[in-house]
Image (cartoon, helix red, strand yellow):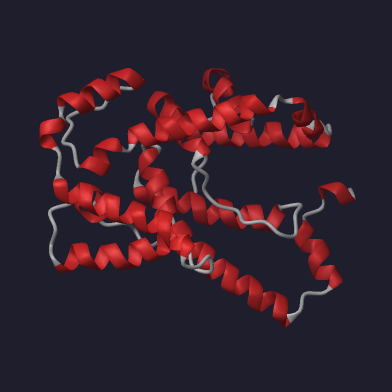
Amino acid sequence: MPTRLQPKLFTVLKEGYSLSHFSADLVAGLITGIVALPLAIAFGIASGVKPEQGLYTAIIAGFLISLLSGSRVQIGGPTGAFIVIVYGVVQQHGIQGLALATMMAGGLLVILGIARLGSVIKYMPYPVTVGFTTGIAVIIAVTQIPDFLGLRLATTPGEFLEKIELYWASRETLNPWALGVGASSLGIILLFPKVTHRIPGSLIAILLVTPVVALFNLPVETIGSRFGEVPNSLPKPTLPDFDLANLQSLFPAAVTIAS
């Protein structure tokens, strides 16, 4: 195997992996796992799938990324930038379509890597990248407004402006308890790093706010009340249906995921 295609894990093991390295990686992995747990659930829900599917993705993809990565220092986990893309694919093609589009995107990335086309990214204008990520952030933020405010909506439109209009029309259903819980969690996440950077603010928010909601039985939705019990085991692996018509219709989505 060419050196440039060899996973960094193999190189690290050949060079020697000490107990001190293992201890540091164990602590880092533990903290990352604790933070990624609620993050994966939240990303799964925001992407239009079940909470457990967000967890499955974080576990399996995180393991494979770490195993096959070309970098010695890397954290593999869910990213918010994919929420908008995944949501669109799920709405149009379902979970089977998302799985197939992901496999196609992986194949495209392998081809681009072998052809050494990754360096082309340096020619992309920086404002394009900033605009892309900022636009995704705005879309995600607007999508989460109903849950943050506890609004009761029968359906949610796909268009941005239609969402805003519906939220305003549903303002009478605002749940002040949900708003208080959301605002408290957001405040802790933003302010706790001023105290210390050693512990993620998101972890502190979960550890503080969740017991308060349970202790006082506050009238806010939980993962269990909305989606039911989250399975404690991985699902049986299955392959998506490889149909030529599906491949053609999913190719644009695969290119978007790969890029």
* Residue at screen point 59% across, 68% down: 28
Image coordinates of residue 111 in percent, x first then y, are 76, 32
Closest to the observer, 242 or 9: 9
Residue at x 16%, y 36% (from the top left corner): 152
| 87 up-or-down from 24: above or below | above
**In the image, 215: left or right of 244?**
left
Is 65 left, or right, of 55 in this rendering? Answer: right
Q: Which image quarter is the C terminus in?
A: top right
Q: Residue furthest bottom?
A: 19
- Whether residue 118 is visible, yes or no, is yes
Most distant residue in the front direction:
194
Residue 185 in percent (x, y) is at 32, 55
Direction right: furthest residue = 2
Is residue 236 in view?
no
> Quadrant of the rendered structure where residue 48 is?
top left
Quadrant in the rendering for residue 174: top left
Q: Residue at x 77, y 25 (%)?
A: 123
Camera-nearest residue between 213 and 76: 213
> Which of 6 and 200 lies nearest the eye of the viewer?
200
What x and y, as percent, mark residue 110? 74, 37
Please state the total of marks drawn on the protein image: 0
144 left or right of 174 in image: right
Nearer to us in this view, 81 or 248:
81
Asked if residue 56 is positioned above or below residue 167 in the image, the reply reads below
**Of all residues shown, which one is farthest toward the left?**
172
Relative to 106, does residue 213 appear above or below in the rendering? below
| x then y, percent, for residue 113 | 78, 37
